[in-house]
């Protein structure tokens, strides 16, 4: 329900020839997705300053793919509404929904201001399992299924949260200051 496979396939085409991309093919919309095997890879380790800087460079390259479309803000709003409908259909815990109601106005305000920031391509799911490192320390991103148009800060927040990177990490601090 959350994943738009047609959009995912388009995004794979956008990043297909990039140095950080693993060749991925989809067979049938929403059916089978196969990625080229990366031999002897390991998961990303944010404790390596060089690796973290290299990953931030990759994100910077991804974020250069911008949307100048006036539809970008509307697309973001449609995504929020879609997720709200799914949570209602799946009868998500009422306590969570009541907490969200308090945040909803803030979320919508942020979306209305979304055009003040560049709306760029974001990966959206920077878990350690989606960031592979080969023996030569080349970094590859996989699983673009949650990618889409958003502020580049979405990826930075995802990276910090999904990898439990301390907010006082000097590289993260320099990113925030820039």
Image (spheres, rainbow, N blue to C red):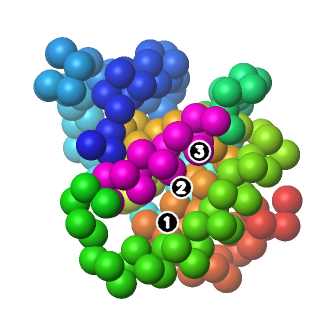
Residue at coordinates 40% horizontally, 37% vertically from top-left?
A: 144
Asked if the residues shown at circle 1 and circle 2 are in contact, with their CB atoms under 8 angstroms apart, the answer is yes
Asked whether 80 falls inside the magenta stretch, the response is yes
Q: Is residue 62 above or below residue 155?
A: above
Q: Position of residue 178 (x, y in %)?
A: 85, 59
Asked if the residues shown at circle 3 and circle 1 are in contact, with their CB atoms under 8 angstroms apart, the answer is no
The residue sitting at the left extreme is: 32
Q: Position of residue 35 (x, y in %)?
A: 24, 28
Q: Which mark is residue 77?
A: 3
Of the numbered discs 3 and 1, the one sitting upstream in the chain is 1
Q: Which mark is residue 46?
A: 1
The region drawn magenta spans 74-87
Of the numbered discs 1 and 2, the one sitting upstream in the chain is 1
Q: Nearer the viewer, mark 3 or mark 1?
A: 3
- Mark 3 secondary-structure assignment: helix
Of the numbered discs 2 and 3, the one sitting upstream in the chain is 2
Q: Which mark is residue 89?
A: none
Could you classify mark 3 by the number of other residues whose Cα lies within 10 Å: few (under 14), some (14-19), or many (20 or more)?
some
Q: Is residue 48 visible?
A: no
- Mark 2 secondary-structure assignment: helix
**Distance from the alpha carbon under mark 3 to that under mark 1:** 32 Å
Q: Position of residue 65 (x, y in %)?
A: 66, 27
Q: Which residue is mark 2?
A: 51
Left-right relation of 35 to 55: left
Instruction: State the residue in front, 5 or 169.
Output: 5
Instruction: State the residue in front, 109 or 61.
Output: 109
Magenta span dominant secondary structure: helix
**Distance from the alpha carbon under mark 1 to that under mark 2:** 7 Å
């Amino acid at each position: 329900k959350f994943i738009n496979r047609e959009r995912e396939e388009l995004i794979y085409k956008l990043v297909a020839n990039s140095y950080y991309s693993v060749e991925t093919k989809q067979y049938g919309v929403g059916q089978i997705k196969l990625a080229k095997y990366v031999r002897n890879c390991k998961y990303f380790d944010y404790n390596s300053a060089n690796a973290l800087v290299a990953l931030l460079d990759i994100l910077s390259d991804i974020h250069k793919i911008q949307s100048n479309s006036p539809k970008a803000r509307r697309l973001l709003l449609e995504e929020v509404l879609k997720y709200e409908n799914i949570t209602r259909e799946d009868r998500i815990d009422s306590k969570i929904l009541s907490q969200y109601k308090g945040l909803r106005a803030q979320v919508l305000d942020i979306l209305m201001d979304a055009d003040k920031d560049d709306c760029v391509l974001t990966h959206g799911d920077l878990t350690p399992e989606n960031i592979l490192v080969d023996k030569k320390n080349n970094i590859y991103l996989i699983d673009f299924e949650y990618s889409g148009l958003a502020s580049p800060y979405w990826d930075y927040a995802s990276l910090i949260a999904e990898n439990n990177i301390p907010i006082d990490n000097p590289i993260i601090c320099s990113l925030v200051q820039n």
